Amino acid sequence: MEFSSFSEASSSRKHLKSCMFGSFSKKGFQRDQSRTTDDLEWINRITECPVYHPAIEDFEDPLEYLQKIAPEASKYGVCKIVPPLTSGAPTGVVMKKEKPGFRFTPKVQPLRIARWTMDDKNTFFIGRKSYTLRDFEVMANRVTANKYCLSGCLPSAYLEREFWVEMMHGKKGTVEYGVNVDGSAFSSSSNDHLGNSKWNLKKLPRLPRSALRLVENPVPGVTDPMLYIGMLFSMFAWHVEDHYLYSINYHHCGAPKTWYGVPGSAAHEFEKVIRRHVYTREILPTDGGNGAFELLAEKTTMFPPKILLQNRIPVYKVVQSPGEFVITFPRAYHAGFSHGFNCGEAVNFAAHDWFPFGGAANERYALLRKKPIIPYEEILCKEAMILSSKTRKDDTCDPDAVSERFIKISFTSLIRKHDCALLWLKSLDRSLRIASNLEETISCSLCKQDCYVANVICNCYVDPICVFHAHITDTELFKCGCRSDRFLSVRRDLPKMKDVAKKFEEEEKLIRGAEKRTKHDNCVSPGCNRHRKGQDTSDRIRYVDTKIQHSKVCGKEGSRCRKLKTFCGKNIAKVDVATPVNKRGTRGKIGISPTWKERRSSGRLKELNKKYGKKASKCHLCCSKIAH
């Protein structure tokens, strides 16, 4: 395999000042001859993600430890964990002993940034040659030595700049990357402390706190780990994990890797920026963010984080060395590259706080008619039924009780959705027959979604249809011609599942009531809204103005005291309201009912006009210190 870009860059190293560096635009990555290596200054503006050094007692249970650090670490999308234990056996010895005859065929990656037009896309194709681990190491070290006169580790900051120089100048150069290679390099020896711990990636996805233990059939790379064998500048392109799952990556041996991560809270904005500034409209399979999501899922899109910084998307980085773990959190986009020959291992897992993300991913897959990899409905229902049989804990501050709330809320929402869909279907066709004979998960023939709770069997389709198509495809289900031969199939234990959902809902109401009273008691003023910072908007809560209270603590103009009304329905834009300054960073009456205007006299406006010498608008009634 030729590495032409390496040789080209080496021969022109004396002329770096005349190098061409690119800038992103909506038409793709355009070159600008007037730019120099100073354009890489953005590399220094990327913040490092957190690094954790757990003590041996904290290292006992991986998911329990991750639950402790998640509130902080998830804000960065990625984090690094330096374990107190080390592997007792070299990777090569383990592979030779436990996987004799091991060989793999790497993928070939173009070392360049594509313009992402119909004529210019990046494709990673399977190479022609297979390697043993030793053969690949020899090849990779030879390439590094030819470029830098040695194959040892070079400074990470230097190689990061070198990588993006190569990507920006790339034309015909390629690298090879052993991606998704079946197997594990964790030792099975009783003398290996790390291999015998729960951090062994062969064990971690099936631990009691991981919902993936309920997946019956093994899924390579998801429930079973896979190896990733890299060389200098081999890359893993920008992507998010399947079903927005957690991922954990262990670095067995070799040169370090540089990781970039975007927190899950910024995933929507990330996709929007990529759609506008990286991809051209002609190559997007669908409109909106889903078009970018589908292309990113191919895992061939690589671009510098510079474009994210320019568009105020939070991005962080970390350098992973041998013996270290890197965690990616739900819906966190990430990418990176290798500094030389190395061998890593990765797998997914699902802590309890993943369920809301899994539900969102499940709905997105159904909308795009993308076949799911794991049965989300089945996992959630089984986890909820197991939880319902446990003794209820009264301590709402207990970490397990907090994490279990994610299961309860997600399960209650799922059963509510099915209830509404079933009632709606029955109202459309009162002659619809119902059978309680559903025993296994079946794929919907239209949206590919897994049907675990209920489905509709219709002779117009080869496979059953999920109950949500009446909502998704505008009564598509009831346009078929076999009305008399169609019936609804539900699980036998659906009544019990409804009872459990009702029980969870009642418990959640009690918990919310206790939290509300506690927060109210801790607030200095009865009219203060500070306790509502960070309010979760997913619970469908809207604010209704009731009165204006004046408080010396909250300011001369006071603040609004609102009732909370919970209802079953769509989210309302009025959720994101907090005055005098709301969550969006703007001031005024965004999303607030206009009835309060009638209660104010024009005297207040006259007073403000006189005070500021300007014409005041009515938003001064809630924020008197600003004049327009």
Image (cartoon, rainbow, N blue to C red):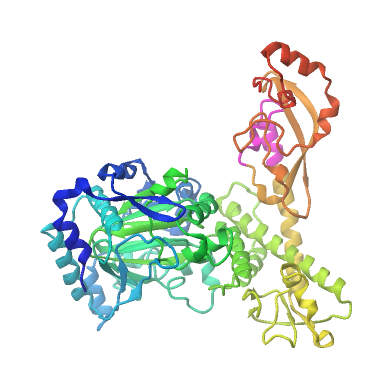
Q: Give the image location of residue 144, x and y in percent.
A: 17, 62
Residue drawn at (20%, 50%) of the image: 155
State the residue in front, 584 or 26.
26
Quarter holding residue 356: bottom right
Find the magenta span and give its range. 515-534
Q: Give the image location of residue 575, x and y in percent.
A: 70, 43
State the residue in front, 301 or 56.
301
Q: Give the image location of residue 116, x and y in percent.
A: 43, 62
Q: Is residue 108 visible?
A: yes
Q: Is residue 317 above or below residue 140?
A: above
Q: Is residue 328 visible?
A: no
Q: Is residue 61 above or below residue 579?
A: below
The quadrant the N terminus occupies is bottom left
Q: Give the image location of residue 164, x and y in percent.
A: 29, 53
Q: Is residue 531 magenta?
A: yes
> Is residue 378 rendered to the left or right of residue 26?
right
Question: Number of numbered discs present?
Answer: 0
Q: Is residue 219 above or below residue 458?
A: above
> Is residue 150 rendered to the left or right of residue 398?
left
> Is residue 595 rendered to the left or right of residue 58?
right
